Image (tube, rainbow, N blue to C red):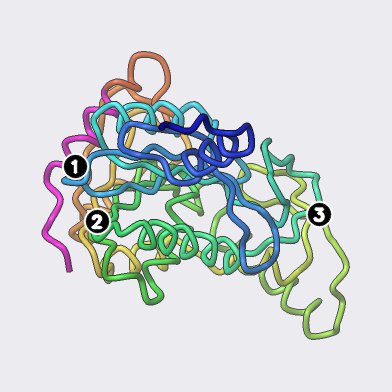
Amino acid sequence: MSRIPTLLQIVWMGLLISLFPHAGQAGVIEARLPTGKVATADFHAGNDGLPAVLILHGFLQTRTFPTIASTYEALSTAGYTVVAPTLSLGISRRNKSLSCEAAHLHSLEDDTEEVAFWVRWLEQKRHQSIVLVGHSFGNVQLLSYLRRSPSPAVTQAILISLVDVEAKQGPQARDRLAQALRDRIIHGNNALLGAEFGNCRKYVSPPAALLSYLNVSRNSILDALARSPVPVEVIMGGKDDRMGADWVEKLVARGIKVRVIPGASHFFDDQYEFDLQEAVLRALSRRPPGR
């Protein structure tokens, strides 16, 4: 004789489904980080025969940023398992971008730890092939992860609009700011300060946290690419005005595979989102065997 499930059983089954989606299912997930903060991500369970993809948004943004959201949708539709986290930046369940003037207590090391956390999260779901996809400054955070001891499950990186950190601030201005930050740290001055950084005229942060990002330079990015333990492909927009005039040439000179989409901006908006999606899918189809 069949039993009718109780309300409690129905609720419990629904919770299990939301936490452990089957192929084709998608939804928002939550996970507690080692710091105690709660991070969120969009997750789609795809086909077992395809690699899992981790997509990371740009600086201070969230996974709902249009470039990330459209790429996530395209990969999900193509059958890939996809996780698109929002970096917490020290805030539980962060669901909106942070302004430049907010108090930024997070560091590049914190971001890198969260990337590692989500890679482990995919591994725990028994994904043995993981591809990293980033947009803009998210690529710096992915490269920081790859410079450490990345999981053997990570087999490829696809970097969209790889940021040129010296396009807005030249190396001299960055060096002066970095030295000023070191001086504050040496003298035990950890008070928040506002400084020009990237696209922010006043980025508010403690000295050590801001210095962690300023330690990234053009040369350190190029070195990280050249020494990457996995194959890297860079996808750039032909009309990306956030890069130095010679940035693509510098990448190519280091032997990096670069695909330029003519007419596209830094964000691949308007009709160029479809060109971007095609480029990402093509790059995935050329994925190498596992390490």
Instruction: Measure the C-alpha gap from mark 3 to mark 2.
Output: 37 Å
Instruction: Measure the C-alpha gap from mark 2 to mark 1.
Output: 9 Å
Give the side of residue 236 with respect to residue 137, left or right.
left
Q: Nearer the viewer, residue 54 or 169?
A: 54
| Residue positioned 21% across, 35% down in the render | 281
Q: Which residue in the protein does label 1 denote?
A: 283
Magenta segment boundaries in residue numbering: 275-291
Q: Which residue in the protein does label 3 denote?
A: 194
| Residue positioned 28% across, 46% down in the render | 234
Identify the amino acid type marked 2: Gln
| Mark 2 surroundings: few (<14), some (14-19) or many (≥20) residues within 10 A | many
Give percent across and percent down for residue 255: 18, 59
Identify the disc placed on residue 239. Answer: none
Q: Secondary structure at mark 2?
A: strand
Instruction: Measure the C-alpha gap from mark 1 to mark 3.
Output: 40 Å
Give percent across and percent down for residue 41: 53, 43
Q: Secondary structure at mark 1?
A: helix
| Residue positioned 81% across, 54% down in the render | 194
Identify the amino acid type marked 3: Gly
Give percent across and percent down for residue 246: 33, 47
Identify the amino acid type marked 1: Ala
- Whether residue 276 appears in magenta in the rendering, the answer is yes
CB atoms of marks 2 and 1 within 8 Å: yes
- Mark 2 or mark 1: whose residue is earlier in sequence: 2
Determine which quarter of the picture holds residue 34.
bottom right
| Mark 1 surroundings: few (<14), some (14-19) or many (≥20) residues within 10 A | some
User: Which-is-in-front pick, marks 3 and 2?
Assistant: 2
Give the side of residue 191 with respect to residue 122, left or right.
right
Identify the disc placed on residue 156. Answer: 2
